[in-house]
Amino acid sequence: MSSAVVVLSGGQDSTTCLAWAKNRFAVIDAITFDYGQRHRVELDCAAEVARRAGVRHHRVLSVDSLRQLGGNTLCGETGAQLGATGQGGLPNTFVPGRNLLFMTLAAAWAWQLGTKDLVTGVCQTDYSGYPDCRADTMAALQQALRLGLELDVVIHTPLMHISKADSVRLARAEGGLELLAWTHTCYAGQVPPCGACPACQLRAKGFAEAGVADPLLARLGGAAR
Ligand SMILES: [Zn+2]
């Protein structure tokens, strides 16, 4: 029976990928990383999405090393404004090594499960320009994992080259809008979402351009600013 491991953050992109994967693999396992992100609501959302999607196993893996290293605003203690430009000209929400680490751990679990297919919501289009979200990074990582695990690993990136609006359209086409009602996007960690932070604005823009009402806002009974 075909199966895949989905890297599930509890956000819009990974949840869309989960819906995509459900239509392509008989069994889905999901893995979520607790890396000291400031907003624990993400982990709650991941658990809820996994439950509603009927995944076989949902593992929440503690990766405390990123917090121990510090140095970024998503899992650090600094008061810097999220989304501002930081080191190397990258947004200060960039967590160095995060996706490299997460994909490697996901692949390690996949190996144990007898699975070779990994699914991740990384995207190099109209997003923050994180270098570990790019297609060439994922291609190189896939090759490293194939060699290092002696497993024919395939990293599926359904969102890699599509816009946020097309991501919303994809979620709709894959029957994933209901799941998106349980996702978290807001950098400020607010529920209902603040509507003002870069993450909220990007999400709102995608739904607006796709002509789709955000099911999260519909569920919470209001619209973000
Ligand atoms: Zn927000």
Image (cartoon, rainbow, N blue to C red):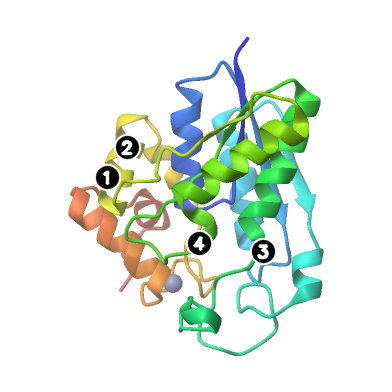
The location of residue 180, given as percent across then percent down, is: 43, 45
Q: In the image, is 76 to the left or to the right of 169? A: right
Asked if residue 78 lies left or right of residue 136, the reply is right
> Which circle's residue, 3 or 2, is located before the other in the chain?
3
Percent of width and height locating residue 201: 33, 69
Residue 211 drawn above or below residue 73: above
For mark 1, give the secondary structure. helix
Which comes before the other along the chain, label 1 or label 4? Answer: 4
Q: Which residue is mark 4?
A: 131
* Residue sitting at x 60%, y 14%: 2
- Report ligand 1 position as a quadrant: bottom left
- Name the amino acid, label 4: Pro
Mark 3 lies on residue: 40
On residue 65, which mark appears? none
**Label 3 is placed on what type of residue?**
Arg
- Please, what is the three-letter code of the amino acid marked with disc 2? Leu
Marks 1 and 4 sit apart, C-alpha to C-alpha, by 21 Å
Q: Residue at x 76, y 36 (%)?
A: 148
- Which quadrant of the view contains residue 192? bottom left
> Label 3, label 2: how many angstroms apart (C-alpha)?
27 Å
